[in-house]
């Protein structure tokens, strides 16, 4: 099979660029003595997780139990779930995982901690716990050192659980102040902080500058996207993932319609990466200005060249993580040949 034989819209990944991105990040972490625990939520593919581990990753990160179950089924043995798990249904599933893999989970509340404790008791197996703190994103995570210390103390007192350290997203200057205060407070209480885990891709190559991050969790780096171009993490040649589309209509001289809408491309903005809903490699001055479910409306007014009906275009997504989750499989290009790889954990948001 060749690229020309593919029907559209279809996601296409260049394995040579993927491998270069993986090596670049692993080399950086190795150089600075930082453990790499890549986040598989971007690709959700067992074969790519195995590639990351083979290069030297210390384990993987999953956002949801469904992802972790797929990875454990494939024999991956060291998994962090970087998301609070709440309630008995989650506890039962975590317990099943803890019987066959080394599991750790992030918590930011007593309720989340109780869920993990229940799972460990059911499994009669150890589970590591990281206390998440908020670095300013305003998402999950405790906001004070006192809260972090209180949770860590409870973890240390709970059978089967081990306090594995602190976790945050994103790793930033704000993380440094929190960790330094936490070290003093924990030491005064007779506790140590085994590690500090931080993410993600935009700040990844500054991690060593912060001086407090022992483990790096990154996901987007494997493919890169327009967001990563906008923040300076990647150049266009570092973007491994395109959505191949076809021009299906040219209603006006300055408008083209492509066969990819919100069901194939993300509606997330690119931030500093540029306007519209993706970068068309062949027509970089064109703007995918609007998406409906199956239509992408392209403004050609700033483009000297104009595509014709039937022409196939390569679109670099604004945000690759949700795009990969929209497709059952991706097409991988390797040494001129193409093959289909299943997105194993696609749609597993529970």
Image (cartoon, grey):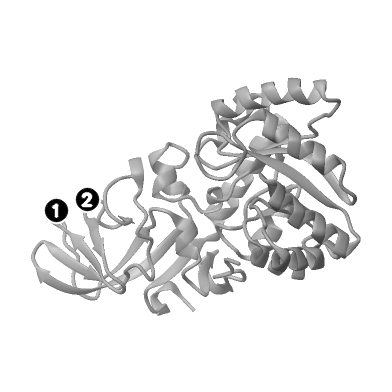
Give the camera-side residue of 81 and 274.
81
Residue 339 visible in this rendered orientation of the protein: yes
Q: Residue, x 61% and y 69% (percent of image)?
A: 345
Give the camera-side residue of 13 and 326.
326
Apparent side of residue 291 relative to residue 178 in the rendered image (left or right): left
Which mark identifies residue 285?
A: 2
Q: Mark 2 or mark 1, which has the lower sequence index?
A: 2
Give the camera-side residue of 147 and 134.
147
Label 1 neighbour load within 10 Å: few <14, some 14-19, many 20+:
few
Q: What residue sits right under mark 1 in the picture? A: 304
Apparent side of residue 233 relative to residue 341 in the rendered image (left or right): left
Q: Residue, x 42% and y 77% (percent of image)?
A: 6
Image coordinates for residue 278, horizontal then vertical, percent: 33, 56
Apparent side of residue 283 relative to residue 233 in the rendered image (left or right): left
Which mark identifies residue 93?
A: none
Q: Residue, x 67% and y 63% (percent of image)?
A: 65
Q: Secondary structure at mark 1?
A: loop
Q: Secondary structure at mark 2?
A: loop
Quarter that holds the C terminus: bottom right
**Where is 250 relative to 31, above or below?**
below
């Amino acid at each position: 099979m060749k690229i020309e034989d593919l029907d559209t819209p279809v996601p296409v990944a260049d394995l040579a660029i993927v491998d270069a991105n993986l090596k670049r990040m692993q080399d950086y972490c190795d150089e600075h003595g930082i453990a790499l625990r890549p986040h598989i939520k971007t690709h959700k593919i067992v074969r790519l997780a195995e590639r990351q581990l083979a290069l030297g990753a210390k384990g993987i990160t999953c956002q949801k139990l469904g992802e972790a179950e797929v990875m454990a089924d494939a024999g991956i043995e060291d998994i962090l779930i970087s998301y609070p798990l709440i309630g008995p249904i989650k506890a039962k599933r975590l317990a099943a995982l803890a019987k066959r893999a080394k599991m750790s989970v992030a918590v930011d509340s007593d309720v989340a901690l109780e869920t993990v404790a229940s799972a460990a008791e059911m499994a009669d197996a150890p589970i590591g716990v990281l206390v998440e703190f908020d670095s300013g994103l305003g998402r999950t995570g405790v906001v004070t050192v006192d809260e972090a210390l209180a949770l860590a103390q409870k973890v240390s007192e709970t059978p089967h659980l081990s306090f594995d350290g602190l976790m945050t997203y994103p790793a930033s200057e704000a993380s440094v102040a929190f960790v330094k205060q936490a070290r003093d407070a924990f030491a005064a209480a007779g506790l140590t902080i085994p590690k500090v885990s931080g993410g993600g891709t935009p700040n990844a190559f500054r991690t060593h500058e912060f001086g407090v991050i022992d483990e790096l969790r990154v996901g987007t780096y494997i493919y890169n996207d327009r967001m990563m171009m906008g923040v300076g993490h990647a150049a266009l040649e570092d973007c491994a993932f395109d959505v191949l589309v076809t021009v299906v209509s040219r209603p006006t001289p300055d408008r083209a319609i492509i066969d990819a809408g919100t069901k194939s491309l993300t509606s997330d903005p690119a931030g500093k990466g540029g306007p519209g809903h993706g970068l068309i490699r062949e027509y970089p001055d064109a703007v995918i200005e609007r998406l409906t479910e199956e239509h992408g409306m392209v403004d050609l007014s700033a483009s000297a060249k104009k595509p014709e009906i039937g022409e196939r275009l390569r679109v670099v997504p604004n945000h690759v993580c949700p795009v990969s989750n929209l497709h059952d499989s991706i097409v991988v290009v390797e040494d001129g040949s193409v093959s289909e790889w299943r997105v194993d954990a696609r749609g597993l948001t529970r």
